[in-house]
Amino acid sequence: MSDLIHAERYREARVLTDAFREAPAPAADRLALLRAALHGAVLAGDAQQLERDATDIVSVLHRCGHREQAAATVAVLLERGPVHGREDRAPASHGRRRGEQVAVSPELLAVVRGLEQTTLPGADGARGTAVDPRRAVVRLRAALAALPTVHELILGDPGTALRLRLAQALEAIGDADGATTQALDVLELVDQQEADAEEPLRDPARTATAAHAVLARTLGVTRPLDAARHALDALDALTEVDDPPLRIGLITRLLQALMAAGATDQATFTAGRLASLQRTLQRDVLRTSALLAVAAQRVQAERYDAAWVPLERARQIAREHRDHRSALEASRLAASIHERTADHPAALAELCRLAHESRWLAEDLATPAHERAELVATQLNAHALVLRRALDLGRTAVVREAAEAIERRARPEGGRPLLPAELLWDHRVDARVGLFLGVGEALRRGEEGADIAAYEHRRREAMQVIGQVPAGHDARARYWAAYVDDRHAQMLADRDEVRSARRAARRARDGWAHLGRGEDLERTEALLSRLGTE
């Protein structure tokens, strides 16, 4: 039933639940079935079934003598209400005799909150409810801390399941290290339980598989070979499971891990299989991650024409579903292809799209807080690349727009900065220097509106921002000052303003000498030699 629910086949899952709802079974097994049914009702948004499942859960707990857990379950469902993660509604739950009062300790309530919480959004794109993962982390830590004191009052042994949920919640808030630790603990607990039982344990919730899936995601960047191994372990457990979202999500992570590990042949084979298997997903929105992974592998393999097919399909799906995150990744890949094939105007257009999508996501209130800094950095870097490419192409207006966008995002005033002050300062200097260079090139080309006064104004602006260097970054400021003087000297020399060019070149020479940049120093010395002596 859990497999059917994860595969979003809710009607089939409900039929299965109803067929076994009254079948004789141990209380722990019946409770597991009803919890899975409740999960499916939440995801399907079926309030009537949700209330029925919640009522049956409480009844099972009462009949098997776990009256305190039943009372705690009623209290949790009433205080939180699992429909769509709302906290203002709960199903009517029954099971206590009229007038009977059962004391519920705070520790028991903490454990039951961890057990009965509604689902988190799926990392593989599966539907989830609006549970704040940060609050989930707090609740699950409290549940694990309280469990030893109330273990005898709980039906079954929920410790492993709670730890798995904590791993998933930590992953959702961006704590990859914490999620990795918890998932490894889950696998260790499963191994210990099997060793104690001297046989493989029944695991209808696929706890070990889910832990391997977490590790396949969290280790992908830092330990790609380990991530690939965990992805394969999870896939090996799915040989008899028809769950396309889970299977394709794992293969996507496997492909990304193989690429990061430089396993070219294995990545090529995996990308081919993934390109075929992603068509089995019922919802297009679940296909974008797989399509983008296939496109990225083909870019890595320098098969640029082949990369465009999955890339454009992913972009189309992202556009239809207003999926800005996938659109961002599509623009990042497209820009890379154009840069590699030396189509610089097309690369410029994609970089502009990348900056737009990252800005949209950074300002979206639904974006998790831990992701905003990275998105702001992506936006600033995209604008910086736009500025450089526009300078190369002589697009003065685009240079100005990119510089202004950097200034708006990196300005020091207003709100708590998401990035370090020295990084924001460096981007502001980059923007001002870019404007200075853009006006200088426009002046050299004789563009309308470009004059020496505007050029000097932009140069002074650049030097002014360089002078606002944060403490401890004087070397970087000296580099920028020497660079501006160097380019200024070249500009003046081209205009035959020899005396001014000589003064600027000397300042640049001193700056390069102080920084020990031999190649730059030689170039400036050569310019001074051409300019002669006074």
Image (cartoon, rainbow, N blue to C red):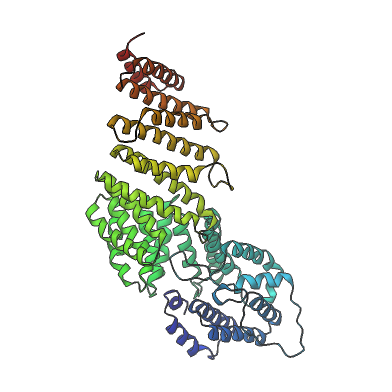
Q: Nearer the viewer, residue 506 or 404?
A: 404
Q: Nearer the viewer, residue 478 or 488?
A: 488
Q: Residue furthest left?
A: 305
**Which quadrant of the structure image shows residue 98?**
bottom right
Residue 196 position (above or below residue 476): below
Left or right, 345 with reference to 467: left
Identified at 36% across, 19% down, the residue is 524
Q: Could you tell me if residue 266 is visible in this image?
A: no
Residue 245 position (above or below residue 513): below
Left or right, 491 with reference to 38: left
Q: Nearer the viewer, residue 478 or 103?
A: 478
Identified at 27% across, 46% down, the residue is 345
Residue 226 position (above or below residue 443): below
Q: Number of callouts in the render?
A: 0
Expressed as whole percent of the image width and height from the top left, the position of residue 227 reads 43, 56
Expressed as whole percent of the image width and height from the top left, the position of residue 191 reads 52, 65
Q: Residue furthest top?
A: 534
Expressed as whole percent of the image width and height from the top left, the position of residue 60 reads 62, 85
Expressed as whole percent of the image width and height from the top left, the position of residue 387 reads 37, 41
**Which quadrant of the structure image shows residue 96?**
bottom right
Q: Could you tell me if residue 338 is visible in this image?
A: yes
Quarter of the image with the C terminus is: top left
Left or right, 443 with reference to 510: left
Q: Residue furthest front?
A: 449
Identified at 40% across, 28% down, the residue is 453
Q: Nearer the viewer, residue 443 or 292?
A: 443
